[in-house]
């Protein structure tokens, strides 16, 4: 079996199908025809059709190979993700250090996360309003422990209005918000996959601590990555691609974001590998071998998530 960090394909199931295991390969059967793919190549599977059956042997193998399996609701939004129960040979050790993480250390890590998130937002906002970008950058430089002054929320108000207009409301039901929510759900599932694969319990967060949320830590760690979804959705708006609604080709592009080129420190990675390295840096912090998280850096030219747009046609 290939390594955890080698998978790269995102599979969409949009029509009725049977999903099964055939000679250790992923098998899709539709209208009497079979398609097989090596499991080692698959990063995630998005099941959009509610007329899909899947065998228990395949589900078990997906867990072994750490492949994220997404289900979707009637509006095609991801509403669930299947991840491995046991994902790391040192899961007990990692869990113990995760549970013992001090409030002070959590506050420091959340400060790092929000600083980078705001810095990334200021970079994207600069193309539309240098003045607003400067405001967000100033917030980034002054984030306190645990973001105690809630600069994240203050920056979000400036940021989304600059990107999508002063009338934009983040929680509205419209194509832009649908696209953002879909992209964020893909990020969340990928982050959860990496966390479980590295021995973490995603329910135990740094900042997020909703007792009904199984992915608090994933929600924490994905924050600096949201910018790449924002950038791709913004390009859709600029190309007038969402005028007829949020459609399957938009969803394919957004799932493809995991293959986008992302800068972390001084090296570029596909996003799914960057996410893994961010998680590894958290593991090293828990071990005491590192002090800072390895977080993504948004660049307007070379690390923006937009090259994925041209990878899928709009038809």
Image (tube, rainbow, N blue to C red):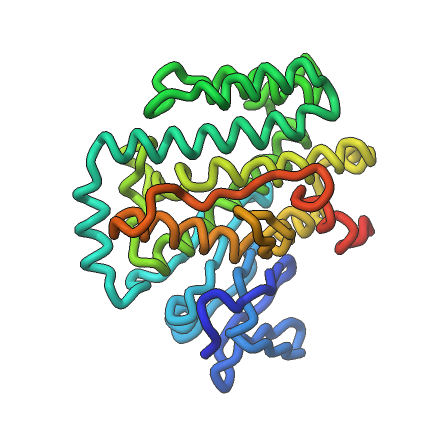
Q: Looking at the image, which residue is at 75% across and 48% down?
A: 309
Q: Against 245, is 41 above or below?
A: below
Which residue is at the front of the view, 23 or 3? 3
Percent of width and height locating residue 169: 60, 18
Q: Looking at the image, which residue is at 50% across and 86% down?
A: 23
For the question of whether residue 49 can be seen, the reply is no
Q: Against 277, is 16 above or below?
A: below
Percent of width and height locating residue 191: 44, 49
Which residue is at the front of the view, 259 or 299? 299
Count of numbered marks: 0
Q: Residue furthest bottom?
A: 23
Q: Looking at the image, which residue is at 61% across and 25% down?
A: 122
Q: Quadrant of residue 205?
A: top left
Percent of width and height locating residue 84: 35, 61
Left or right, residue 65 beside residue 234? left
Q: Looking at the image, which residue is at 55% across and 57% down?
A: 47
Q: Quadrant of the N terminus?
A: bottom left
Q: Against 50, is 243 above or below?
A: above
Which residue is at the front of the view, 211 or 204? 204
Q: Quadrant of residue 104?
A: top left
For the question of whether residue 228 can be seen, the reply is yes
């Amino acid at each position: 079996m290939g390594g955890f960090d080698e998978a790269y394909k995102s599979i969409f199931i949009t029509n009725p199908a049977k999903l099964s295991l055939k000679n250790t390969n992923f098998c899709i059967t539709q209208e009497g025809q079979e398609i097989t793919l090596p499991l080692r190549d698959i990063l995630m599977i998005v099941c959009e059709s509610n007329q899909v059956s899947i065998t228990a042997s395949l589900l078990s193998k997906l867990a072994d190979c750490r492949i994220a399996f997404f289900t979707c609701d009637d509006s095609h939004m991801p509403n669930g993700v299947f991840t491995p129960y046991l994902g790391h040979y040192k899961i007990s050790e990692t869990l113990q250090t995760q549970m013992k993480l001090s409030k002070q250390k959590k506050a420091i890590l959340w400060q790092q996360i929000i600083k980078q998130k705001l810095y990334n937002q200021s970079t994207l906002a600069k193309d539309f309003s240098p003045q607003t970008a400067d405001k967000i950058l100033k917030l980034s430089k002054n984030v306190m422990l645990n973001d105690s002054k809630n600069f994240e929320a203050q920056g979000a108000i400036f940021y989304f209005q600059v990107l999508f207009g002063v009338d934009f409301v983040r929680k509205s039901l419209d194509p832009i918000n649908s696209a953002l929510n879909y992209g964020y759900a893909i990020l969340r599932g990928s982050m959860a996959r990496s966390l479980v694969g590295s021995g973490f319990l995603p329910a135990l967060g740094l900042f997020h601590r909703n007792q009904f949320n199984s992915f608090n830590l994933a929600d924490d760690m994905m924050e600096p990555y949201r910018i790449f979804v924002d950038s791709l959705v913004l390009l859709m708006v600029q190309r007038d691609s969402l005028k007829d609604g949020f459609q399957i080709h938009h969803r394919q592009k957004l799932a493809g974001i995991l293959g986008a080129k992302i800068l972390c420190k001084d090296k570029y990675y596909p996003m799914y590998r960057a996410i893994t390295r961010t998680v590894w840096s958290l593991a090293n912090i828990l071990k005491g071998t590192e002090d800072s998280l390895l977080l993504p850096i948004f660049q307007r030219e070379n690390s923006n998530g937009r090259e994925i747009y041209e990878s899928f046609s709009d038809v």
